[in-house]
Image (cartoon, grey):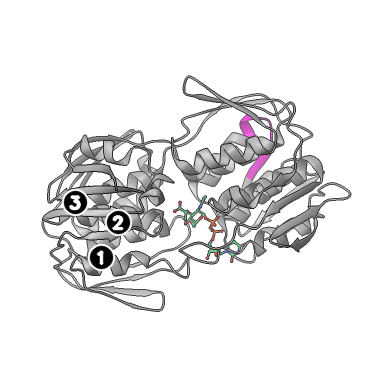
Amino acid sequence: MQKLEVLGANKLRGQINISGSKNASLPILASTLLSRKKVYLNNLPKVKDIETMINLLQSLGSKIKFKKKKLVIDNSRQNKKFASYNLVKTMRAGILVLGPLLAKFGYAKVSLPGGCAIGTRPVDIHLKALSKLGVKYKIIQGYVHATAPNGLIGCKIRFSKISVGATENLIIAASLAKGTTTLSNCAIEPEITDLINFLITVGCNIKWISKRSLKIVGVSEINEETYSVMFDRIEAGTYLIAAAVTEGNLKIKNVIPKIMRTEINLLKKIGAKINIRKDEIHIIGNKKIKSMNIKTSPYPGFPTDLQAQIMVLLCKANKTSLIKEDIFENRFMHVSELNRMGAQISINGNKASIQGNTKFAAAELMATDLRASVSLILAALNAKGKSIINRIYHLDRGYENIEKKLQKVGAKIRRING
Ligand code: EPZ
Protein backbone atom coordinates (compact mmCIF):
# COMPACT_ATOMS: atom_id res chain seq x y z
CA MET A 1 0.00 0.00 0.00
CA GLN A 2 1.59 3.32 -1.02
CA LYS A 3 1.99 6.27 1.36
CA LEU A 4 3.07 9.88 1.10
CA GLU A 5 5.86 11.27 3.25
CA VAL A 6 5.72 15.06 3.76
CA LEU A 7 8.45 17.09 5.45
CA GLY A 8 7.07 20.43 6.60
CA ALA A 9 7.00 23.25 7.09
CA ASN A 10 7.82 25.13 3.95
CA LYS A 11 6.42 27.87 1.73
CA LEU A 12 5.33 26.92 -1.80
CA ARG A 13 6.81 29.10 -4.52
CA GLY A 14 6.56 28.86 -8.31
CA GLN A 15 4.07 27.84 -10.98
CA ILE A 16 1.58 24.95 -11.16
CA ASN A 17 -0.11 23.94 -14.44
CA ILE A 18 -3.67 22.73 -13.89
CA SER A 19 -4.83 19.49 -15.57
CA GLY A 20 -8.13 18.73 -17.27
CA SER A 21 -11.23 18.43 -15.10
CA LYS A 22 -12.07 14.98 -13.68
CA ASN A 23 -15.68 16.03 -13.10
CA ALA A 24 -16.12 17.34 -16.65
CA SER A 25 -14.31 14.36 -18.23
CA LEU A 26 -16.49 11.72 -16.55
CA PRO A 27 -19.90 12.85 -17.91
CA ILE A 28 -18.34 13.68 -21.31
CA LEU A 29 -16.80 10.19 -21.50
CA ALA A 30 -20.16 8.60 -20.53
CA SER A 31 -21.96 10.69 -23.17
CA THR A 32 -19.70 9.35 -25.95
CA LEU A 33 -21.86 6.20 -25.73
CA LEU A 34 -24.46 8.19 -27.71
CA SER A 35 -22.11 7.92 -30.71
CA ARG A 36 -22.15 5.10 -33.27
CA LYS A 37 -18.92 6.46 -34.78
CA LYS A 38 -15.69 7.94 -33.43
CA VAL A 39 -15.13 10.78 -30.95
CA TYR A 40 -11.78 12.39 -30.02
CA LEU A 41 -11.08 13.92 -26.56
CA ASN A 42 -8.11 16.06 -25.46
CA ASN A 43 -6.89 17.24 -22.04
CA LEU A 44 -8.26 14.31 -20.03
CA PRO A 45 -6.46 14.13 -16.64
CA LYS A 46 -4.39 11.00 -15.94
CA VAL A 47 -6.26 9.98 -12.77
CA LYS A 48 -7.75 6.69 -11.58
CA ASP A 49 -11.41 7.66 -12.02
CA ILE A 50 -10.82 8.41 -15.72
CA GLU A 51 -9.07 5.04 -16.13
CA THR A 52 -12.06 3.36 -14.43
CA MET A 53 -14.56 5.14 -16.71
CA ILE A 54 -12.51 4.12 -19.78
CA ASN A 55 -12.54 0.50 -18.52
CA LEU A 56 -16.30 0.76 -18.06
CA LEU A 57 -16.78 2.03 -21.64
CA GLN A 58 -14.53 -0.75 -22.95
CA SER A 59 -16.61 -3.32 -21.01
CA LEU A 60 -19.61 -1.92 -22.93
CA GLY A 61 -17.83 -2.51 -26.26
CA SER A 62 -16.20 0.88 -26.98
CA LYS A 63 -12.81 0.55 -28.69
CA ILE A 64 -10.56 3.10 -26.96
CA LYS A 65 -6.92 4.06 -27.50
CA PHE A 66 -4.64 7.01 -26.84
CA LYS A 67 -3.05 8.63 -29.90
CA LYS A 68 -0.35 10.90 -28.49
CA LYS A 69 -2.39 12.87 -25.91
CA LYS A 70 -5.71 12.46 -27.71
CA LEU A 71 -8.19 9.77 -26.63
CA VAL A 72 -9.84 8.03 -29.62
CA ILE A 73 -13.18 6.36 -28.85
CA ASP A 74 -14.61 4.15 -31.60
CA ASN A 75 -18.21 3.07 -30.96
CA SER A 76 -18.93 1.59 -34.39
CA ARG A 77 -19.30 -1.81 -32.69
CA GLN A 78 -20.40 -0.69 -29.22
CA ASN A 79 -23.48 -2.79 -28.37
CA LYS A 80 -23.32 -3.97 -24.74
CA LYS A 81 -25.80 -2.61 -22.19
CA PHE A 82 -24.53 -4.09 -18.91
CA ALA A 83 -22.42 -1.97 -16.49
CA SER A 84 -21.05 -4.23 -13.76
CA TYR A 85 -20.84 -3.57 -10.01
CA ASN A 86 -17.07 -4.14 -9.86
CA LEU A 87 -16.49 -1.09 -12.07
CA VAL A 88 -19.32 1.14 -10.80
CA LYS A 89 -18.70 0.52 -7.07
CA THR A 90 -15.29 2.33 -7.09
CA MET A 91 -16.50 5.26 -9.15
CA ARG A 92 -20.07 6.44 -8.57
CA ALA A 93 -20.10 8.41 -11.81
CA GLY A 94 -20.59 5.01 -13.49
CA ILE A 95 -24.33 5.65 -13.13
CA LEU A 96 -23.89 8.25 -15.90
CA VAL A 97 -23.84 5.48 -18.54
CA LEU A 98 -27.52 4.78 -17.79
CA GLY A 99 -28.86 7.80 -19.71
CA PRO A 100 -26.87 7.26 -22.93
CA LEU A 101 -27.49 3.49 -23.03
CA LEU A 102 -31.24 4.03 -22.69
CA ALA A 103 -31.19 6.78 -25.33
CA LYS A 104 -29.27 4.60 -27.78
CA PHE A 105 -30.67 1.09 -27.16
CA GLY A 106 -33.84 1.56 -25.08
CA TYR A 107 -32.41 -0.90 -22.54
CA ALA A 108 -29.69 -0.90 -19.83
CA LYS A 109 -28.66 -2.91 -16.79
CA VAL A 110 -26.45 -0.72 -14.61
CA SER A 111 -25.19 -1.37 -11.10
CA LEU A 112 -26.40 1.01 -8.41
CA PRO A 113 -23.30 2.95 -7.31
CA GLY A 114 -23.70 2.32 -3.61
CA GLY A 115 -22.52 4.66 -0.88
CA CYS A 116 -19.08 5.98 -0.08
CA ALA A 117 -17.23 7.73 2.75
CA ILE A 118 -19.04 11.04 2.21
CA GLY A 119 -22.59 9.79 1.94
CA THR A 120 -25.17 7.26 0.74
CA ARG A 121 -25.08 8.74 -2.78
CA PRO A 122 -28.64 7.79 -3.85
CA VAL A 123 -29.74 8.06 -7.50
CA ASP A 124 -33.49 8.48 -6.95
CA ILE A 125 -33.52 11.88 -8.70
CA HIS A 126 -31.85 10.35 -11.79
CA LEU A 127 -34.39 7.49 -11.93
CA LYS A 128 -37.47 9.63 -11.29
CA ALA A 129 -36.51 12.03 -14.06
CA LEU A 130 -35.67 9.23 -16.52
CA SER A 131 -39.08 7.65 -15.89
CA LYS A 132 -40.64 10.97 -17.00
CA LEU A 133 -38.93 10.35 -20.38
CA GLY A 134 -40.73 7.00 -20.64
CA VAL A 135 -38.23 4.73 -18.87
CA LYS A 136 -39.57 1.74 -16.88
CA TYR A 137 -37.15 0.38 -14.28
CA LYS A 138 -36.84 -2.20 -11.50
CA ILE A 139 -34.07 -2.53 -8.90
CA ILE A 140 -33.05 -6.19 -8.73
CA GLN A 141 -30.10 -7.34 -6.58
CA GLY A 142 -28.37 -3.95 -6.65
CA TYR A 143 -28.84 -3.37 -10.39
CA VAL A 144 -31.13 -0.97 -12.24
CA HIS A 145 -32.91 -2.91 -14.98
CA ALA A 146 -34.29 -0.16 -17.22
CA THR A 147 -36.19 -0.23 -20.51
CA ALA A 148 -37.71 2.43 -22.76
CA PRO A 149 -40.12 0.31 -24.84
CA ASN A 150 -41.16 3.26 -27.08
CA GLY A 151 -37.80 5.02 -26.93
CA LEU A 152 -37.28 8.21 -24.90
CA ILE A 153 -39.99 10.82 -25.44
CA GLY A 154 -39.15 14.46 -24.67
CA CYS A 155 -41.21 16.28 -22.00
CA LYS A 156 -41.02 18.89 -19.23
CA ILE A 157 -39.01 17.77 -16.19
CA ARG A 158 -38.31 19.67 -12.97
CA PHE A 159 -35.67 18.25 -10.62
CA SER A 160 -36.93 18.01 -7.03
CA LYS A 161 -33.43 18.89 -5.80
CA ILE A 162 -30.32 20.32 -7.49
CA SER A 163 -28.15 17.35 -8.49
CA VAL A 164 -25.04 17.54 -10.69
CA GLY A 165 -25.19 13.88 -11.73
CA ALA A 166 -28.94 13.78 -12.36
CA THR A 167 -28.71 16.95 -14.49
CA GLU A 168 -25.89 15.37 -16.51
CA ASN A 169 -27.67 12.02 -16.96
CA LEU A 170 -30.83 13.72 -18.23
CA ILE A 171 -29.00 16.14 -20.57
CA ILE A 172 -27.30 13.14 -22.16
CA ALA A 173 -30.49 11.02 -22.39
CA ALA A 174 -32.66 13.87 -23.74
CA SER A 175 -30.09 14.64 -26.46
CA LEU A 176 -31.28 11.60 -28.46
CA ALA A 177 -34.91 11.57 -27.20
CA LYS A 178 -37.80 12.09 -29.64
CA GLY A 179 -39.04 15.69 -29.48
CA THR A 180 -38.23 18.47 -27.01
CA THR A 181 -37.29 18.18 -23.33
CA THR A 182 -37.08 21.08 -20.88
CA LEU A 183 -35.13 20.51 -17.68
CA SER A 184 -35.63 22.93 -14.77
CA ASN A 185 -33.98 23.36 -11.36
CA CYS A 186 -30.77 22.11 -13.01
CA ALA A 187 -27.33 22.15 -11.45
CA ILE A 188 -25.22 24.77 -13.29
CA GLU A 189 -21.67 23.70 -12.37
CA PRO A 190 -19.08 24.66 -15.04
CA GLU A 191 -18.55 20.95 -15.70
CA ILE A 192 -22.18 20.76 -16.85
CA THR A 193 -21.62 23.67 -19.24
CA ASP A 194 -18.55 21.79 -20.52
CA LEU A 195 -20.68 18.66 -21.12
CA ILE A 196 -23.23 20.81 -23.00
CA ASN A 197 -20.45 22.43 -25.07
CA PHE A 198 -19.16 18.95 -25.98
CA LEU A 199 -22.64 17.72 -26.97
CA ILE A 200 -23.27 20.85 -29.08
CA THR A 201 -19.87 20.27 -30.75
CA VAL A 202 -20.99 16.77 -31.80
CA GLY A 203 -24.28 18.12 -33.16
CA CYS A 204 -26.78 18.13 -30.28
CA ASN A 205 -29.38 20.89 -29.86
CA ILE A 206 -29.18 22.22 -26.27
CA LYS A 207 -29.57 25.72 -24.87
CA TRP A 208 -30.05 27.50 -21.55
CA ILE A 209 -33.49 29.18 -21.46
CA SER A 210 -33.10 30.57 -17.93
CA LYS A 211 -30.53 30.43 -15.09
CA ARG A 212 -31.37 26.83 -14.17
CA SER A 213 -33.47 25.66 -17.16
CA LEU A 214 -32.44 23.94 -20.38
CA LYS A 215 -34.25 23.21 -23.66
CA ILE A 216 -33.05 20.09 -25.49
CA VAL A 217 -34.35 19.13 -28.94
CA GLY A 218 -33.51 15.47 -29.62
CA VAL A 219 -31.33 14.61 -32.63
CA SER A 220 -31.06 11.23 -34.39
CA GLU A 221 -27.30 10.75 -34.04
CA ILE A 222 -24.10 12.54 -32.98
CA ASN A 223 -21.17 13.43 -35.27
CA GLU A 224 -17.48 12.56 -35.27
CA GLU A 225 -15.70 15.53 -33.68
CA THR A 226 -12.79 16.49 -31.40
CA TYR A 227 -13.22 18.25 -28.04
CA SER A 228 -10.87 19.53 -25.32
CA VAL A 229 -12.09 19.19 -21.74
CA MET A 230 -12.03 22.27 -19.44
CA PHE A 231 -9.53 22.80 -16.57
CA ASP A 232 -10.06 21.25 -13.14
CA ARG A 233 -11.32 24.09 -10.93
CA ILE A 234 -11.17 21.93 -7.78
CA GLU A 235 -7.50 21.08 -8.42
CA ALA A 236 -6.89 24.80 -9.02
CA GLY A 237 -8.75 25.74 -5.83
CA THR A 238 -6.77 23.16 -3.87
CA TYR A 239 -3.44 24.70 -4.94
CA LEU A 240 -4.70 28.25 -4.28
CA ILE A 241 -5.51 27.18 -0.72
CA ALA A 242 -2.13 25.42 -0.45
CA ALA A 243 -0.43 28.74 -1.21
CA ALA A 244 -2.53 30.51 1.43
CA VAL A 245 -1.86 27.80 4.06
CA THR A 246 1.92 27.86 3.52
CA GLU A 247 2.17 31.69 3.12
CA GLY A 248 3.53 30.86 -0.29
CA ASN A 249 3.62 32.56 -3.68
CA LEU A 250 2.08 30.53 -6.54
CA LYS A 251 1.06 31.14 -10.15
CA ILE A 252 -1.77 28.76 -11.08
CA LYS A 253 -1.84 28.39 -14.88
CA ASN A 254 -4.29 27.03 -17.53
CA VAL A 255 -7.39 28.30 -15.70
CA ILE A 256 -10.38 30.55 -16.45
CA PRO A 257 -10.38 32.88 -13.41
CA LYS A 258 -13.98 34.09 -13.83
CA ILE A 259 -15.24 30.53 -13.20
CA MET A 260 -13.58 30.70 -9.75
CA ARG A 261 -14.93 34.10 -8.68
CA THR A 262 -16.40 32.74 -5.42
CA GLU A 263 -13.19 31.03 -4.31
CA ILE A 264 -11.01 34.00 -5.31
CA ASN A 265 -13.20 36.53 -3.47
CA LEU A 266 -13.27 34.35 -0.36
CA LEU A 267 -9.47 33.91 -0.31
CA LYS A 268 -9.04 37.68 -0.71
CA LYS A 269 -11.42 38.26 2.25
CA ILE A 270 -9.41 35.75 4.30
CA GLY A 271 -6.29 37.81 3.59
CA ALA A 272 -4.49 36.42 0.53
CA LYS A 273 -3.22 38.79 -2.19
CA ILE A 274 -4.51 37.68 -5.62
CA ASN A 275 -3.81 39.01 -9.13
CA ILE A 276 -5.62 37.66 -12.17
CA ARG A 277 -4.39 37.40 -15.76
CA LYS A 278 -6.05 35.79 -18.79
CA ASP A 279 -5.39 32.15 -17.92
CA GLU A 280 -3.56 32.57 -14.60
CA ILE A 281 -4.28 33.26 -10.95
CA HIS A 282 -1.31 34.61 -8.95
CA ILE A 283 -1.73 34.19 -5.19
CA ILE A 284 0.50 35.39 -2.33
CA GLY A 285 -0.30 34.02 1.11
CA ASN A 286 -0.52 36.21 4.21
CA LYS A 287 0.64 35.55 7.75
CA LYS A 288 -2.60 37.07 9.05
CA ILE A 289 -5.60 34.89 8.20
CA LYS A 290 -9.08 36.19 9.00
CA SER A 291 -11.74 33.81 10.38
CA MET A 292 -14.77 33.15 8.15
CA ASN A 293 -18.21 31.54 8.27
CA ILE A 294 -18.72 29.40 5.14
CA LYS A 295 -21.61 27.30 3.80
CA THR A 296 -21.13 24.86 0.94
CA SER A 297 -23.75 25.14 -1.81
CA PRO A 298 -24.37 24.36 -5.46
CA TYR A 299 -22.49 26.51 -8.02
CA PRO A 300 -21.97 29.44 -7.99
CA GLY A 301 -21.75 28.96 -4.21
CA PHE A 302 -18.68 27.67 -2.36
CA PRO A 303 -17.98 24.11 -3.61
CA THR A 304 -18.28 21.16 -1.23
CA ASP A 305 -15.20 19.71 -2.97
CA LEU A 306 -13.06 22.48 -1.42
CA GLN A 307 -14.59 22.27 2.06
CA ALA A 308 -11.90 20.05 3.60
CA GLN A 309 -9.15 22.20 2.09
CA ILE A 310 -10.51 25.57 3.28
CA MET A 311 -10.98 24.06 6.75
CA VAL A 312 -7.20 23.60 7.01
CA LEU A 313 -6.69 27.28 6.17
CA LEU A 314 -9.30 28.38 8.73
CA CYS A 315 -7.45 26.39 11.43
CA LYS A 316 -4.78 29.08 11.08
CA ALA A 317 -7.19 32.03 11.28
CA ASN A 318 -7.07 34.60 14.10
CA LYS A 319 -10.45 33.54 15.57
CA THR A 320 -13.06 30.76 15.45
CA SER A 321 -14.67 29.98 12.07
CA LEU A 322 -17.78 28.00 11.16
CA ILE A 323 -18.32 25.69 8.18
CA LYS A 324 -21.76 24.34 7.26
CA GLU A 325 -21.65 21.33 4.90
CA ASP A 326 -24.98 21.56 3.09
CA ILE A 327 -24.41 19.10 0.24
CA PHE A 328 -23.26 15.75 1.67
CA GLU A 329 -24.31 14.15 4.94
CA ASN A 330 -20.92 12.89 6.06
CA ARG A 331 -18.17 15.05 4.68
CA PHE A 332 -16.19 15.74 7.85
CA MET A 333 -14.05 12.56 7.81
CA HIS A 334 -10.89 14.72 7.69
CA VAL A 335 -11.72 16.44 11.03
CA SER A 336 -10.51 13.67 13.34
CA GLU A 337 -7.20 13.45 11.45
CA LEU A 338 -6.73 17.23 11.56
CA ASN A 339 -7.45 17.20 15.31
CA ARG A 340 -4.71 14.59 15.73
CA MET A 341 -2.36 17.19 14.21
CA GLY A 342 -3.35 19.76 16.81
CA ALA A 343 -6.42 21.35 15.26
CA GLN A 344 -9.39 22.11 17.55
CA ILE A 345 -12.46 21.40 15.45
CA SER A 346 -15.80 20.32 16.90
CA ILE A 347 -18.73 18.97 14.91
CA ASN A 348 -22.43 19.39 15.53
CA GLY A 349 -24.48 17.70 12.80
CA ASN A 350 -23.47 19.31 9.51
CA LYS A 351 -21.69 22.21 11.20
CA ALA A 352 -18.01 22.36 12.14
CA SER A 353 -16.59 24.95 14.52
CA ILE A 354 -12.89 25.59 13.85
CA GLN A 355 -10.80 27.25 16.56
CA GLY A 356 -8.02 29.37 15.05
CA ASN A 357 -4.31 29.83 15.79
CA THR A 358 -3.54 26.14 15.23
CA LYS A 359 0.10 25.08 15.10
CA PHE A 360 -0.11 21.85 13.12
CA ALA A 361 2.14 19.05 14.40
CA ALA A 362 3.38 16.33 12.06
CA ALA A 363 1.73 12.91 12.49
CA GLU A 364 0.95 9.58 10.81
CA LEU A 365 -2.42 10.02 9.11
CA MET A 366 -5.16 8.08 7.30
CA ALA A 367 -6.85 9.32 4.14
CA THR A 368 -10.57 8.51 3.89
CA ASP A 369 -11.83 10.10 0.68
CA LEU A 370 -10.47 12.09 -2.24
CA ARG A 371 -10.77 15.63 -0.93
CA ALA A 372 -10.12 14.75 2.74
CA SER A 373 -6.78 13.19 1.74
CA VAL A 374 -5.60 16.36 0.03
CA SER A 375 -6.52 18.42 3.11
CA LEU A 376 -4.13 16.23 5.12
CA ILE A 377 -1.34 17.13 2.68
CA LEU A 378 -2.08 20.84 3.14
CA ALA A 379 -1.85 20.48 6.93
CA ALA A 380 1.32 18.34 6.67
CA LEU A 381 2.97 21.00 4.45
CA ASN A 382 2.37 23.39 7.28
CA ALA A 383 3.46 21.15 10.16
CA LYS A 384 7.07 21.06 11.35
CA GLY A 385 8.47 17.56 10.90
CA LYS A 386 7.66 14.37 9.00
CA SER A 387 4.05 13.34 8.35
CA ILE A 388 3.00 10.09 6.72
CA ILE A 389 -0.32 9.84 4.87
CA ASN A 390 -1.72 6.32 4.37
CA ARG A 391 -4.31 5.02 1.84
CA ILE A 392 -3.33 7.55 -0.82
CA TYR A 393 -5.21 5.55 -3.46
CA HIS A 394 -8.03 7.98 -2.58
CA LEU A 395 -5.82 10.84 -3.81
CA ASP A 396 -4.88 9.14 -7.05
CA ARG A 397 -8.56 9.04 -8.04
CA GLY A 398 -8.64 12.77 -8.70
CA TYR A 399 -5.25 14.55 -8.54
CA GLU A 400 -2.84 14.13 -11.47
CA ASN A 401 0.85 13.90 -10.41
CA ILE A 402 0.17 15.71 -7.15
CA GLU A 403 3.53 15.07 -5.53
CA LYS A 404 5.43 16.05 -8.72
CA LYS A 405 3.45 19.30 -9.02
CA LEU A 406 4.11 20.10 -5.34
CA GLN A 407 7.81 19.11 -5.48
CA LYS A 408 8.23 21.54 -8.39
CA VAL A 409 7.14 24.43 -6.12
CA GLY A 410 9.32 23.45 -3.17
CA ALA A 411 7.34 20.90 -1.18
CA LYS A 412 9.35 18.10 0.40
CA ILE A 413 6.94 15.31 -0.46
CA ARG A 414 7.53 11.80 -1.80
CA ARG A 415 5.62 8.60 -2.42
CA ILE A 416 6.89 5.57 -0.48
CA ASN A 417 5.88 1.92 -0.63
CA GLY A 418 5.09 0.63 2.77
C1 EPZ B 1 -20.87 15.51 -8.24
O1 EPZ B 1 -21.34 14.39 -7.50
C2 EPZ B 1 -19.35 15.46 -8.15
N1 EPZ B 1 -18.87 14.24 -8.76
C3 EPZ B 1 -18.92 15.53 -6.68
O2 EPZ B 1 -17.49 15.55 -6.65
C4 EPZ B 1 -19.43 16.83 -6.09
O3 EPZ B 1 -19.09 16.89 -4.72
C5 EPZ B 1 -20.97 16.88 -6.25
O4 EPZ B 1 -21.33 16.74 -7.64
C6 EPZ B 1 -21.55 18.19 -5.74
O5 EPZ B 1 -20.99 19.26 -6.41
C7 EPZ B 1 -18.71 14.21 -10.11
O6 EPZ B 1 -19.00 15.15 -10.80
C8 EPZ B 1 -18.18 12.93 -10.68
P1 EPZ B 1 -25.07 15.54 -6.62
P2 EPZ B 1 -22.91 13.95 -7.60
O7 EPZ B 1 -25.94 14.63 -7.40
O8 EPZ B 1 -23.39 14.18 -8.98
C9 EPZ B 1 -28.06 14.05 -3.25
C10 EPZ B 1 -15.35 14.84 -6.03
O9 EPZ B 1 -14.76 14.95 -4.94
N2 EPZ B 1 -28.68 13.26 -4.32
O10 EPZ B 1 -25.05 16.99 -6.98
O11 EPZ B 1 -23.05 12.62 -7.01
C11 EPZ B 1 -26.63 13.58 -2.93
O12 EPZ B 1 -26.67 12.50 -2.01
C12 EPZ B 1 -16.81 14.43 -6.05
O13 EPZ B 1 -14.84 15.09 -7.16
C13 EPZ B 1 -29.87 12.59 -4.05
O14 EPZ B 1 -30.40 12.65 -2.94
O15 EPZ B 1 -23.57 15.03 -6.62
C14 EPZ B 1 -26.00 14.81 -2.35
O16 EPZ B 1 -26.37 14.92 -0.99
C15 EPZ B 1 -17.33 14.09 -4.66
N3 EPZ B 1 -30.45 11.86 -5.04
C16 EPZ B 1 -26.65 15.94 -3.14
O17 EPZ B 1 -27.86 15.38 -3.69
C17 EPZ B 1 -29.89 11.76 -6.29
O18 EPZ B 1 -30.47 11.08 -7.17
C18 EPZ B 1 -25.80 16.46 -4.29
O19 EPZ B 1 -25.44 15.35 -5.07
C19 EPZ B 1 -28.68 12.44 -6.54
C20 EPZ B 1 -28.09 13.21 -5.55
Secondary structure beneath dot 3 equals helix
Q: Is residue 116 above or below residue 181?
A: below
Residue that lies at the very extreme toward the right in this rendered image: 150
Q: CA distance from mark 2 to mark 3?
A: 10 Å
The residue that disc 3 covers is 381
Q: Position of residue 249 (x, y in %)?
A: 16, 42
Q: Residue at x 63, y 61 (%)?
A: 123
* Residue beneath disc 2: 375
Q: Residue furthest bottom?
A: 348
User: Which residue position holds label 1?
Assistant: 338
Q: Specify whether residue 369 is in view.
A: yes
| Element marked by disc 1 | helix
Amino acid found under the numbered disc labelled 3: Leu
Label 3 crowd bin: few (<14), some (14–19), many (20+), radius 10 Å: many
Crowding near the residue tagged with mark 1, few <14, some 14–19, many ≥20 C-alpha atoms within 10 Å:
many
Q: Which of the numbered marks, if any, corresponds to residue 105?
A: none
Q: Which residues are magenta?
A: 200-207
Of the numbered discs 2 and 3, the one sitting upstream in the chain is 2
User: Separation of disc 1 and disc 2 at Cα?
Assistant: 9 Å
Quick one: 232 or 192, which is closer to the camera?
232
Q: Amino acid at mark 2?
A: Ser
> Circle 2 — which element?
helix
**179 on left or right of 336:** right
Q: Position of residue 344 (x, y in %)?
A: 21, 73
Q: Are marks 1 and 2 in contact (CB under 8 Å)?
A: yes
Image position, residue 62 (x, y; %): 67, 32
Q: Amino acid at mark 1?
A: Leu
Q: Separation of disc 3 and disc 1 at Cα?
A: 13 Å
> Could you say which quadrant of the image residue 259 lies in?
top left
Q: Is residue 293 visible?
A: no
Question: Does the magenta portion include 194?
Answer: no
Tag 2 near tag 3, CB within 8 Å? no
